[in-house]
């Protein structure tokens, strides 16, 4: 997310970063380029105008002129204004009501609403220890109810049944009554989507809203829709009085226009972003962290939280003790680290959160292909336990057998062994051998070939 915008802004701001003096002329030139970068990112035009004007007014004031490092001061202003644009701080869910707290999910068809219902249910269960129920009031889309039932079972959520021949109002009221009897903490209602906004859709969801009186009404929108996402959210907000927005598919959005437009256009906070297809790929939206990511400053807080949440701490401690005792880092350990990195979204996801990534050329970052992890794991799985423990025993005939068993080439095996040696050196360099220390070393290996 924000790849294109981040690259453009970093190129623009790099030109003024080291300047000892800023003039009206170079500020005007910089803001013209910032304006173009935002427009190319599909940020809504009124939002771009306001943003550029606010930055320009602060840049031409004493805040920058009196600074010993005016270039850096201007970058701080851009960051501050990005944070203001996106909502200052994360606004979490308001569940302060007599249980069950009802969350009504609205959105257009294809926005990922049903999947997001399951993701949000999992997030509430794992992070807030809530007992969550879900129900589908979408009686129009074929298999919508079955889809939510399947997703709920996968996440161990309470699925409240509904039928396609029922009235959506009847479904919602019945589910709320059932949720009370089951002593659920939260009830998430998945509503019907449409291919476009229409009067019938709005009437139905207004009636649902009145019937169940949700404490949260969240609009789910595809981030790749750009400024159209903000305009659609605005239309829904005028009909429903939304309490927040969830942006989906941000992992496939290189522009980020929706994230920068929605808050300003609707006046409603972005509460979560969907960052992938996996059921745990839902993150709280932190404007300050996102602003830092856009400007290439990284997002170590999110990275640390992700490591703490997704890395097997016992396994990391076991590896650290093993290395401390001088037993080395073998190919089985290498595979474990690959699997854990995959669990965190792969190297591409981690790179966005590392400081300084904005200075790494996009063509270098594009060389990192997470699909290679699957090939590496296949190669290691085709080895015997002894070969994994003692890679030096891999002679020509063994490599041919492994290549045949993993569907790869001998060159791939040689490349893996070379990467394993590089990882060994990194593990020793960052001593404890845990994932957090390894992550700190990734940046030092760019630009150039990644150690994995």
Image: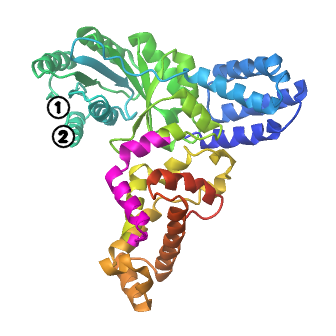
Per the picture, the main secondary structure of the magenta-coloured stretch is helix
Element on which disc 2 rests? helix
- Check contact, mark 1 vs mark 2: CB within 8 A: yes
Q: Name the residue beneath numbered marker 1.
A: 159
Instruction: Measuring from the top left, give residue 181's x and y in whole percent.
Output: 9, 18
Q: Which residues are magenta?
A: 303-331
Residue 54 at what x, y percent from top left?
A: 72, 18
**Most extreme residue toward the bottom, as rendered?**
397
Q: Residue at x 61, y 35 (%)?
A: 292
Q: Residue at x 84, y 21 (%)?
A: 66
Chain-order first, disc 1 or disc 2: 2
Q: Which mark is residue 78?
A: none
Magenta stretch containing residue 143, yes or no? no
Location of mark 2 (residue): 153
Q: Does 111 appear above or below 445?
A: above
Neighbour tally class for label 2: few under 14, some 14-19, many 20 plus, Cα within 10 Å: few
What residue lies at 70% left-to-right and 35% top-to-bottom?
Answer: 37
Q: Quadrant of residue 34?
A: top right
In the image, residue 15 sits, relative to residue 182, either above or below, namely: below
């Amino acid at each position: 997310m924000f790849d294109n915008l981040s690259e453009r802004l970093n190129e623009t701001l790099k030109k003024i970063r080291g300047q000892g003096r800023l003039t009206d002329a170079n500020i005007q030139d910089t803001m013209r380029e910032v304006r173009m970068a935002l427009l190319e990112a599909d940020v809504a035009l009124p939002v771009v105008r306001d943003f550029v004007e606010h930055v320009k007014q602060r840049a031409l004031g004493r805040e920058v002129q009196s600074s010993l490092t005016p270039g850096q001061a201007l970058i701080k202003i851009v960051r501050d204004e990005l944070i203001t644009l996106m909502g200052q701080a994360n606004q979490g869910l308001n569940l302060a009501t007599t249980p069950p707290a009802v969350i009504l999910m609205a959105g257009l068809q294809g926005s990922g609403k049903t999947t997001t219902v399951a993701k949000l249910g999992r997030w509430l269960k794992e992070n807030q220890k809530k007992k969550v129920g879900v129900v589908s009031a979408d009686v129009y889309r074929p298999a919508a109810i079955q889809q939510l039932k399947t997703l709920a079972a996968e996440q161990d959520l309470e699925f409240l049944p509904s039928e396609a021949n029922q009235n959506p109002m009847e479904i919602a009221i019945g589910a709320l009554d059932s949720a009370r009897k089951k002593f659920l903490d939260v009830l998430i209602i998945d509503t019907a989507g449409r291919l476009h906004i229409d009067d019938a859709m709005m009437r139905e969801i207004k009636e649902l809203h009145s019937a169940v009186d949700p404490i949260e009404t969240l609009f789910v929108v595809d981030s790749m829709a750009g400024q159209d996402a903000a305009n659609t959210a605005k239309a829904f907000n005028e009909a429903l009085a939304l309490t927040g927005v969830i942006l989906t598919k941000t992992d496939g959005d290189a522009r980020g226009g929706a994230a920068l437009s929605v808050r300003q256009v609707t006046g409603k906070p972005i509460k979560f972003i969907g960052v992938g297809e996996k059921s745990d790929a839902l993150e709280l939206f932190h404007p300050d962290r996102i602003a830092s990511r856009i400007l290439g400053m990284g997002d170590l807080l999110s990275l640390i939280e992700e490591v703490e949440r997704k890395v097997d701490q016992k396994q990391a401690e076991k590896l650290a003790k093993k290395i401390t005792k001088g037993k080395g880092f073998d190919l089985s350990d290498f595979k474990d680290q690959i699997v854990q990195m995959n669990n965190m979204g792969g190297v591409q996801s981690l790179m966005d959160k590392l400081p300084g990534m904005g200075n790494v050329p996009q063509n270098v970052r594009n060389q990192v292909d997470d699909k290679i992890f699957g090939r590496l794991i296949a190669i290691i799985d085709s080895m015997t336990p002894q070969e994994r423990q003692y890679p030096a025993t891999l002679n020509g005939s063994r490599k041919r057998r492994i290549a045949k068993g993993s569907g790869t080439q001998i060159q791939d095996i040689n490349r893996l062994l070379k990467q394993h040696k590089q990882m060994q050196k990194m593990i020793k360099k960052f001593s404890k051998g845990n994932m957090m220390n390894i992550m700190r070393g990734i940046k030092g290996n760019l630009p150039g070939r990644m150690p994995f």
